[in-house]
Structures are given as C-alpha cells and as structure tokens.
Amino acid sequence: MSEQPAPANTAARQQLDPAAADAVRAYAARTRANADQFAAVLEDIAANGLLGGGLHPVGGPARGPPRPPGRPAPGRRLMAPQHGPRRARITFSDSAAKQLEHITSETEIHALDRALVVVSVDPDVGEPIPGDTAGPQLRQYTDEVERVRLLYWVTALRTVVVVAYIEV
C-alpha cells in the first residue's frame, strides 16, 4: 500500500468537519498499528518457530480419562450419547496472552469469545497462510461482522488450537 494519499480533486470532494477528520486519522493510526503488530508476530514466528514461548490455556485443567460406562438396569439398554464432535481446546501464545490482557471492553470480549468458539468447533475455518506445509499450518480467521482477526495453528491431533495473534 502506498503512504501517499489519493490525488485530490477538491471540486468533487466533500470536506469533513474537524472532529470527523480527527476520528478518521485515529482509525487510520489504529489500523496501521494493528498491521505492524500482525507483521511483527509473523516475523517472530518465521524467526523463532511456532512455539517460541509458553502456552496459556483457557479454562480449567485438562480432564482426566473418561469414566467407564455404567451397567444398564436389567431389561434396559444404554443409549449412545447424542453429542456433536468434540471441540478443540484453545490456548494462547505469549504474545496473544499479552494482547488478551489489554482487552477490557465487554463488547470486544464477547466478539473474541464468538470467534474462538467458531475456531474451536472447526479449526479449518481460517484461510491458510502461505508457507511450509511440513509442520502445523498457520491460519487466519477473520470475522467481518464482529471485527475480529485471529492468527492460529492447530496441533497434529487437532485437539488444541494455539492462538498467536488477536485483533479486536
């Protein structure tokens, strides 16, 4: 993208009032900062690999092994559970955990939660980011409605989604 503004045809353009112009400039600055932070995370992953730091799980400790099924009462059969597929567990890299600490708005937390649920239910929902296919593939999920972007990868058994970058 170019740093130069579009050529101005002042006769055809309607000028913004000063408050609106300041709001547009602030939005542009936030967008530029988010793009810089996203690029920094990608460069860090390229330089240090996917697990450059610790992982920060969401929720409580992992569950133990499943309990053995109980015996049915005489004359009754046990019914198979009617559950859907198991969701992947979400964890955060060090950089994503730091980003998470700065999210304080209830609206942003709700939007992020919805995006994390989507990714945990279907880890392949994000578009692959070009790169080496030998290891876990980086993916980017963008929710245009909630205005959330996640950079993540999925473990080999598809049971854990590691979020590397959050943008709300």
Image: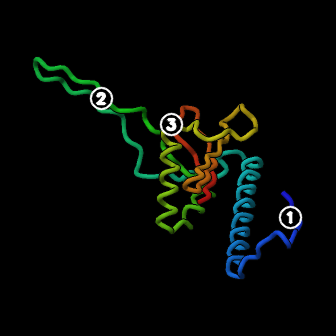
Name which residue type carries label 2: Pro
Q: Which residue is identified by label 1?
A: 6
Labels 1 and 3 touching (C-beta < 8 A): no
Q: Residues within 10 Å of mark 2 (few under 14, many from 20)?
A: few
Q: Residue at x 56, y 67 (%)?
A: 102
Q: Which residue is mark 2?
A: 81
**Which x, y percent locates residue 3?**
86, 64
Q: Residue at x 71, y 63 (%)?
A: 31
Please indicate whether residue 5 sits to the left or right of residue 28 in the image.
right
Residue, far top: 75
Real-space CA distance between mark 1 and mark 3, rounded to the nearest whole angstrom = 47 Å
Q: State yes or no: discs 2 and 3 in contact (Cβ < 8 Å).
A: no
* Residue at 52% across, 50% down: 115
Residue 152 appears in the rendering? yes
Task: Tell me the element at label 2.
Answer: loop
Q: Nearer the viewer, mark 2 or mark 3?
A: 2
